[in-house]
Amino acid sequence: MTRLEELKERLQMYREAERKILSGVEYQIGDRRLRRPDLSAVRAAIQDLEDEIALLEDSKRGIRRAVFID
């Protein structure tokens, strides 16, 4: 499994966790079973994974990104 495939799989797991949190159900990520919804942490992880996936996909296409930080 490539790094990109692993990231996409993790992203799918985090999106499923987000859906479960929003519906008020207990959720699990890997070996961790979580009961108290921590939506902000899950959303932050989703954003991080989406960013990392975009960088990997862009690098495969030869695209470079500039990130400006205030």
Image (cartoon, rainbow, N blue to C red):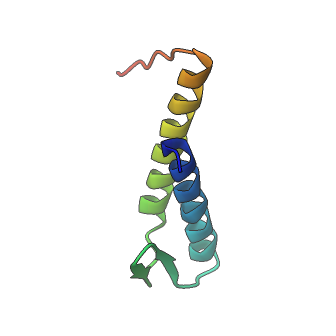
Please give the name of the residue rendered at 50% of the width and 56% of the height, measured from the top-left corner.
43
Horizontal and vertical percent for residue 68?
41, 18
Position of residue 12 in the picture relative to residue 43 (left or right):
right
Horizontal and vertical percent for residue 62?
57, 15
Pick the residue in front: 39 or 30: 30
Please give the name of the residue rendered at 62% of the width and 19% of the height, measured from the top-left corner.
61
- Up-down relation of residue 3 to residue 62 (above or below): below
Pick the residue in front: 40 or 6: 6
Please give the name of the residue rendered at 58% of the width and 50% of the height, measured from the top-left corner.
8
Horizontal and vertical percent for residue 39?
49, 65
Pick the residue in front: 11 or 59: 59
Name the quarter where the C terminus is drawn.
Answer: top left
Position of residue 12 in the picture relative to residue 67 (left or right):
right
Residue 35: quarter of image: bottom left
Horizontal and vertical percent for residue 16?
62, 68
Q: How many numbered marks are there? A: 0
- Up-down relation of residue 60 to residue 42 (above or below): above
Which residue occupies the extreme front position in the image? Answer: 1
Please give the name of the residue rendered at 59% of the width and 30% of the height, measured from the top-left corner.
57
- Up-down relation of residue 22 to residue 33 (above or below): above
